[in-house]
Amino acid sequence: MYKVTVLYGPPDSTEEFDRYYDQTHIPLAQEMTGLKRWTVCRFEPAPDGTPPEYHYQAELYTDSRADLELVLESQAGKAANEDVANFASGGAVFLFGEEREVPVR
């Protein structure tokens, strides 16, 4: 599977970020068609209490990079991308790559 990982830096207000992401950004981004999977994760401090470098992560999956580019270049994809500036006061990093699973023992 191919994916884009979006890492969101610590925002000015975690409460405002979380509210906006859940109530506004997710419904907007759900208009994108062609995704195979979509996951999100809110990071927590490490066991020793060290705060995480990033606040939040989203991963969007398709079968190939070409498929992902079609999703992101669609009208809904462009709208979701443009919306990031409305809530990501801590910045956002977009990472693209093919995921492969490593067997566990």
Image: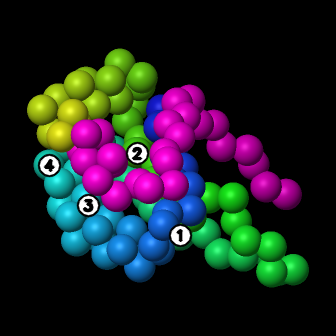
Give the magenta-colored segment's residue range. Answer: 80-105
Marks 4 and 3 sit apart, C-alpha to C-alpha, by: 9 Å
Marks 2 and 3 sit apart, C-alpha to C-alpha, by: 12 Å
Q: Residues within 10 Å of mark 4 (few under 14, many from 20)?
A: some
Under circle 3, the secondary element is helix
Q: Earlier in the sequence, mark 2 or mark 3?
A: 3
What residue is drawn where x is 32% and y is 65%? 21
What residue is drawn where x is 49% and y is 48%? 91
Residue type at the position of mark 2: Leu
Q: Is residue 95 one of those drawn in magenta? A: yes
Q: From the viewer's perspective, is 16 left or right of 74?
A: right
Q: Residues within 10 Å of mark 1 (few under 14, many from 20)?
A: few
Residue type at the position of mark 3: Ile
What residue is drawn where x is 49% and y is 63%? 11
Residue type at the position of mark 4: Glu
* Residue designated by label 4: 31
For the question of whether residue 93 can be seen, the reply is yes
Marks 4 and 1 sit apart, C-alpha to C-alpha, by: 22 Å
* Residue designated by label 2: 60
Q: Is residue 34 above or below residue 30?
A: above
Evaluate if marks 2 and 3 touch, with contact meaning CB atoms under 8 Å apart.
Answer: no
Q: Earlier in the sequence, mark 1 or mark 2?
A: 1
Q: From the viewer's perspective, is 34 left or right of 65?
A: left
* Residue designated by label 3: 26
* Residue designated by label 1: 42
Image coordinates of residue 68 in percent, x first then y, are 35, 29
**Nearer to us in this view, 36 or 25:** 25
What residue is drawn where x is 17% and y is 54%? 28
